[in-house]
Amino acid sequence: MSELYGELQSAMKAMEASFHVGLIGTFRPDLVCVRRDDNVSHALELEQGKDFDQFPVLHDDSIVGILFRGDYDRSWSVADVMNDAGDGVLVSSTMPIADLIPELQILHAKLILRNARIEGLVTQSDLLKLPVRILVFGLVNHLELCLRALIRTRLKESEWLDRLNSAARSRVTKDQRRLRKQRLEPDPLEFTTFSHLIQIVLAEPDMPDDSKEELERIKALRDDIAHAKTFIASPDDVYKFATTFIILQRWIENITLMVEAAS
C-alpha cells in the first residue's frame, strides 16, 4: 500500500502544479484598462468598464498598476489612487492556483506577470472558474482517500463499521453483498461516503477538538462544488472559501503524516 500511496501523493502534487493562474486570469487584449493620467472619475465611468471593480493601469503601453473602484474625489487622477505594480500586487502566470487562493483573501485582485511583462489580471470572481472547482474537488477526493488509508491502518473492518450509525452500516453491507453475488470482493471502505468517513475518524482519540467543525466545512464546500453552486458572492464568501481551502490542505497534510506513521 505504501508504494501506491506514494504514487498518489506525487500525482496530487503534480495536479496542484498544473492548475496555475494562467488558466483563470484575463490577459491582453481582453483587459479593460485605464490610463495613469486620466481623471479617476472619468476612468470609472467608462461604458466598457461598468461591470468591473478592478482595472489595470496603463502608462504608454505598459501596465504599471491597478485601480480599484471606490468613492474618490473627482479632482484626483488615477495615479493619485492606484496601487503601483509591486510585490504585493504581482503574481506569476505559473503560480499554482492553490497558492493564489489565500492571497486573494487580502487583495481582491492581482496583476499577472507573464514572459517578464505584466499581461493580465486575476480577481476574486475568477475563483468560480472551472479549473478552481476541479482543483478543489480533486483535493477533497484526495482527503477522502487519505482518510480511508488511515482507517485501514488503524481499524479492523468490524471496528470501523461499529462507528457508523445503523442506516450507514446497512448501506455499506448491502452494497458489499450485492457485489459479492457477482463474484467480486470489494473493499467495504469503498462504499463509504465522506459523511461516513467523518463519523469514523472523529472517534479517534488523537483528532483535534475542532475536527468536526472543520470536516463539516470541507464537506459543505465539496457539496457546493459537486452541485455547481455559486459558492462566492461577496468578499466575506471569498474569505470563508480561502479559509476552508487552507483547512483542507492542512487536513491532507496531517492525515498523510498519520498514515505514514502507522505504516
Image: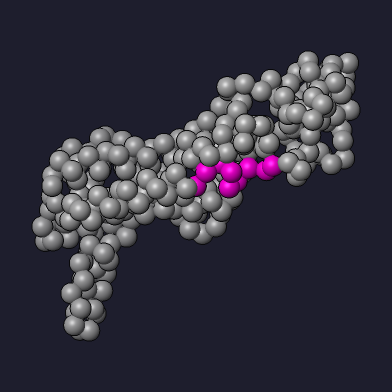
Q: Residue 101: x percent and y percent?
A: 51, 37
- What residue lies at 22% left-to-right and 84% top-to-bottom? 182
Magenta-highlighted residues: 19-27
Q: Residue 146: x percent and y percent?
A: 27, 50
Q: Residue 114: x percent and y percent?
A: 62, 36
- What residue lies at 20% left-to-right and 53% top-to-bottom? 3
Coloured how?
one colour
Side of 245 relative to 120 (left or right): left
Looking at the image, which is closer to me, 217 or 108?
A: 108
Side of 204 relative to 19 (left or right): left
Side of 135 relative to 159 (left or right): right
> From this viewpoint, is residue 113 visible?
yes
Q: Residue 172: x percent and y percent?
A: 24, 68
Residue 184 lies within the magenta run: no
- Figure check: 190 above or below 124: below
Residue 23 lies within the magenta run: yes
- What residue lies at 67% left-to-right and 37% top-to-bottom? 120
- Figure check: 178 above or below 217: below
- Figure check: 163 above or below 65: below
